[in-house]
Amino acid sequence: MTPTKTGALALICTLGLALSACAGDRSEQIAAQNEIDHQNCLELGFEEGTEAYGNCRLKLREIRAAESQRDSGGNFGVGIGIGIGL
């Protein structure tokens, strides 16, 4: 193998390892958050497997999504447009 091919192969392997490490961390974060949500809903008095429990879990996800969007400044933008109301 030429030095260029060896370097490219090493780079690809390194990137692959880095990406797989990130994926592992993310799945662990999701599992931990799911457990926290589960415990929170149980502590609030919801029984697992009921519609109310499902609504509790959904509401917690909605709250986190809204907080994440607020913290990231997700609605910032500049532009010029013409609107026609019908």
Image (cartoon, rainbow, N blue to C red):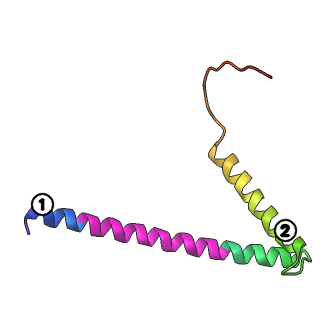
Please rate how many residues cluster around mark 1, counting C-alpha atoms within 10 Å: few if below 14, some from 14 to 19, many from 20.
Answer: few
Question: Which element is circle 2 on?
Answer: helix
- Residue drawn at point x = 12 percent, y = 60 percent: 4
Q: Chief secondary structure of the magenta span?
A: helix
55 on left or right of 8 = right
User: In the shown orientation, is residue 22 left or right of residue 62?
Assistant: left
Rendered residue at 28%/70% (across/down): 13
Left or right: where 7 falls relative to 32: left
Q: Quadrant of residue 37?
A: bottom right
**Is residue 21 covered in magenta?**
yes
Question: Over which residues does the magenta segment extend?
Answer: 11-32
**Residue 59 at x, y percent in the picture:** 81, 62
Identified at 86% across, 74% down, the residue is: 53
User: Which image quarter is the N terminus in?
Assistant: bottom left
Q: State the residue lying farthest toward the bottom.
A: 48
Which label's residue is closer to the chain start, 2 or 1?
1
Does the stretch in magenta take in 5?
A: no
The amino acid beneath tag 1 is Thr
Whole-number angstrom distance, CA of label 2 to CA of label 1: 55 Å
Q: Which of 40 and 1 is in front in this view?
A: 1
Q: Name the residue under label 1.
A: 4
Q: In the image, which disc is placed on residue 75?
A: none
Disc 1 secondary structure class: helix
Q: Quadrant of the C terminus?
A: top right
Label 2 packing within 10 angstroms: few (<14), some (14-19), many (20+): some
Q: Which amino acid does label 2 sit on?
A: Cys
Q: Quadrant of residue 54?
A: bottom right
Q: How many marks?
A: 2
Dot label at residue 56: 2
